[in-house]
Amino acid sequence: MRNDPDVLRAASMYQLGLPRMPVSGRSGELLGRGTGTSLEFQEYREYMPGDDIRHLDWSAYARSDALMVRLYREEISPRMEVLLDTSRSMTTTSNKMLLAKQLAATFSLLSGAIGGRPIIWLLGDERPPRSLFLETLQALETTSFEGQGSLDALLADHQPPMQRQSVRVVISDFLFPHDPETLVRRLARDASVLWLIQILTSWEANPEPGGGTRLIDVETARETDLYLNRKVVSEYRQRLGHLQEELALHCRRHHATFATLTAESGLAVSCREELTQVEILRTT
Amino acid sequence: MYFANPIGLLGLLSLPAIAIIHLYHRRFPPRLVAGLHLWGEEVRQPTAGRKRERLPITPSLLLELLAALVLSLILSQPRFGEMDEVTHLIAVLDNSASMGATGAEGVSFRDQAVAQIRSRMEDTSRGSVITVILTGRRPVMLAGPAVEWDVARQALADWRPTATKHDVLSALDMASQLAENGGEVLFVTDSMPSEKEQLQKNVEVVSVGESLSNLAFTAARWTVNSTTLNGQIFLRLINAGPRSADVSIVGRSGTSTVFSSKITLAGGAERSLEAPVPGGLGRVDIRLESPGDPLSIDNRVTLIEPAIRTVSVANQLPADSFSGRSFQRVLDALPDLRRAPANGAHLVIAPGGEMPESRRDLWWLGVGPLDPSEESRKAARDLLGPFLVEKRHSLLDGILLSGVVWAGVQPVELGVAPLISAGPQKLLSQLDGTESTAFLLNIDLQRSNLTESPDWPILLSNLVELRRESLPGLRRWNYRLNEDIVFRLFEGAFESKETAGRPLTLKSGDESRVLARSAIVEVPPLDDAGVYTVLDGDEPFGEFAVNYFDLEESTLTNLRSGHREATVEEEDAHFEIDDPYTWLILVGLPLIILLAFSDWFLLRPRKA
């Protein structure tokens, strides 16, 4: 996945749409709340023992004989957590799984590019969940999506152990039964930034009326025979729309961002037309 | 195709079976989905008991039904042989009366002919069609064109051959024309045509006849003496066989026997019989009976008693004159004629100087001298000839005027049409400008030798008979089959307004036909023997009998059975293609596979 041309192209074209306000993190390319080692000058103060003598302003000392230290804005690197839903529901089409993997890889690469140390949590049935780093990103390609539990249940078990002040990206279809308010609240807890990215197939997003169909839940294996007439399809669309509205509403309440992608659109289109639209990504 | 084939029939049972399976065990195409709860599955409440639902018409159901139907069709082994070998049999039946004869084995030729056709149709494949044509003066299509055998069989059940001797070529021509688009022509007769007869080459001939002896009437006549009113029936019969036969002849009027006779007729002999009958019988039915006689149609005769058509004549010439005596002498000798006063007579003979009144029912003969004055008689011319005689006029049939001196000829100032003339002199003329039928005889009989010549009684007889013919009513009462029947409905050329609109009907038994109404009525030749009644409106106008007399058809000794194939095979009798069942299998099996694949494709597991 690290060598996926689509992923590499996206990583080269975009940067993470992190907010301008300082966030916590390692020394890196983002400005932190405190002073640091960035080149952006903040203020002077008198030298105190222990200060980095590289920051002494020798010109000011020549003018005033006072040792003054130049204080610079702290630069930090964000902590990036990608929560990738690896349940079976993400395998209803191969495009859906592929886009999910590509997005996880892209976010990891973009985070790594600014000095972050991204972590990808594979949210399946394993306890604790498996995780991938930049070094092991290639393993994402062979990762199977076999989980049968829901993300909601996983979070209820306080899994995975999420970091404070992290940039948190959740990639899922969010088609498991859940309460959007509770789910978003749990995901937003201690996160500096939260992005919810929903991936749906085009049929899941916009099914057309058809004949009799046996619907089989890919995770629970429950079956039901339905005539997909206009009424049934309309009711489905209403329920899905309601779910998306609830997710978007609670995301706004927690200063998070919610985006829905169509699996068949592919990574490039999704980045260009959807993720940049909601400022999850920015063009370089 | 036979779905009666057990395997094909069993194959059809798969259709309701598939429908039941789809009704109670649905196999909707599966689709894997991520959020089943969004489809409302969790809110669906199963109802108690089985709920009857409408059979879903799904592509899968249609494909499976179609596949089962195709498979059943293949298993039923449809007989396409019927399609590629459908035969159009054009059967030409000899409609001559001899076909009604009963053979030595007690089966009539007619029945044998029908059996021949039935057998031929049974040998053809299902779906074959038949056209039945009867020979005759005018060929008749008894069944067809190209009808199923059941239809033709019903038509043949009512077929009774009654025709007299006729040419069969016109019927065979019609059959050949029908066979141009494909068909086999079969001519069934009782007399094998000789090789010399030029029948159409595509005609297969089957003769079912056999040599038989037969007794038959060949002529019958009823005459009435106008004086005594008694009648005389004349019969002629023949033994058309090699051996002598005992014959019983009985004439009946109603239930009473009028005459009877028993004779022995030698083989090949012909005998005439005469029987006196009293007047007033009206109708006599005569039967000939002889043990073992094979043909009945020529054994019976029905005769209608002729009516006497008397002509009334008024001779207004002076009785003591030469002219008057000359006319009266001939008139007294003519039959069925009576004297009458001038105002009620059919024919008035009067002096030529007086013009007749104009009346449609008046026939008038004016006799010279036209001007009886002495001066004019002296000026009149005597002519020796040559005489120009209008031979086409019936009045002058047999008139020669050989050696006749036509004397006392005077100039004719009236508008006339000359019938006998000598140069510019008009000797016998028909007057123009009058409704009466008036003739003018420009002659002085006393000075002429016409009354002493043979032409004199002939001329008067012609005149009387012409007048008799012009009387309304039937001229004859007994006819042969196919004989022209002509009678006069009313006098003159035009009918009175009272009767002009009435229908004129010819009725025989339950059948009737409308005749064209005119002064002279011509009845088309009749094909069926029997008694016919002419109805003028609802009033009976006359009754006549038509009898079967045909010596040739009654002679059965030359009949032979035989069979002759068509000399030219009809190439278009049927069309052939490669074995269609093979094609059906070649097409059907891939179709079933395609349908099964399509069904699988529809029902395959799919991800959402």
Image (cartoon, rainbow, N blue to C red):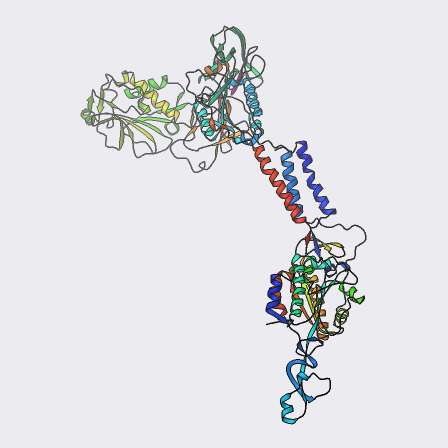
> Between residues B189 and B583, which one lies in front from this camera angle?
B583
The quarter in which the N terminus of chain A is drawn is bottom right
Image location (x, y in percent) of residue A226: 71, 55
Residue drawn 72% across and 44% down?
A: B20
Image location (x, y in percent) of residue A177: 76, 63
> Between residues B185 and B336, which one lies in front from this camera angle?
B185
> Between residues B297 and A277, which one lies in front from this camera angle?
A277
Q: State which quadrant residue B113 falls in.
A: top right
Q: Please provide the residue range marked out in magenta.
A: B281-295
Report the label total: 0
Asked whether residue B100 is drawn in magenta, I would say no
Image location (x, y in percent) of residue B493: 38, 33
Horizontally, is B102 left or right of A169 in the view? Answer: left
Residue drawn 62% across and 32% down?
A: B77
| A151 vs B203: above or below | below
Horizontally, is B569 left or right of B382 in the view? Answer: right
> Between residues B112 and A1, which one lies in front from this camera angle?
A1
Residue farthest to the bottom?
A64
| B475 vs B55: above or below | above
| B304 vs B343: above or below | above
Residue drawn 67% across and 33% down?
A: B7
Image location (x, y in percent) of residue A49: 73, 86
The quarter in which the C terminus of chain A is drawn is bottom right
Horizontally, is B39 left or right of B337 in the view? Answer: right
Task: Evaluate whether residue B565 shows in this view.
Answer: yes
Task: Evaluate whether residue B325 shows in this view.
Answer: no
